[in-house]
Amino acid sequence: MAAYAICVRDGQILLSRSPAPDGGPPEWVLPGGGMDHGEDPHDTVVREVAEETGYRIEVTGLLGIRSSHRVFPRRLRRSVDHHGVGIVYEARVTGGELRYEVGGSTDMAAWHDLDAVPGLNRVVPQVDFGLGLWRERPTTGRVVLPET
């Protein structure tokens, strides 16, 4: 379980940069991350955005939920059957100053023009799913992305 924030202001979106685990180029992701045991998802997104960006936020709405299921093959061991659930909130920055996370899962945070997002190296399903929710505001809390 994880919680993520869509923070848009003045035509820009706040994103965090995540180093690729395989040493490839870093990827832009929504600020947010994993819930601690017993933590409320609302508290998770507030904490994670502060950790990754330095900003304090106010959650202004629940946009939707992304469920993903993948099986990751392993060479010498059994495959890993992973089911992730990400809750996507809309939020606005209420304080703090932009800074980078040290010693965490991200190494940078920045505002990007919404029109520039397609050109960024990003985890396509996560960022695009969140932006789809933000733009469409479906009553079901779900958008269907085209196959890539």
Image: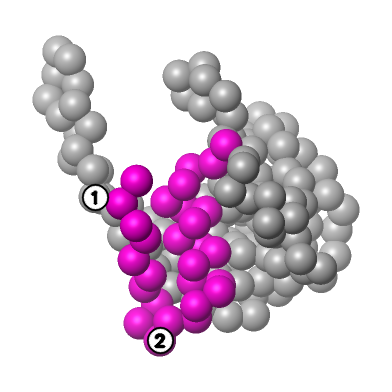
Residue type at the position of mark 1: His
Q: Indicate whether residue 137 is drawn in magenta.
A: yes
In this picture, is 27 found above or below 87? above
**Label placed on residue 139:** 2
Outermost residue, top direction? 76
Residue 145 left/right relative to 121: left
- Please give the residue where the numbered disc 1 appears in the rendered image: 69
Which badge, 1 or 2, is on the more N-terminal residue?
Answer: 1
Residue 119, given in percent of the width and then of the height, sits at: 62, 42
Residue type at the position of mark 2: Thr
Tell me the quarter of the image containing the N terminus.
Answer: bottom left
Q: Say which of 17 and 80 sits in front.
A: 17
Residue occupying image coordinates x 85% and y 58%:
96
Residue occupying image coordinates x 51% and y 63%:
130
Q: Quadrant of residue 38?
A: bottom left
Residue 81, given in percent of the width and then of the height, sits at: 18, 40
Residue 146 left/right relative to 94: left
The stretch of residues the image draws in magenta is 121-148
Residue occupying image coordinates x 43% and y 73%:
64
Residue contact between numbered discs 1 and 2, judged by CB atoms under 8 Å:
no
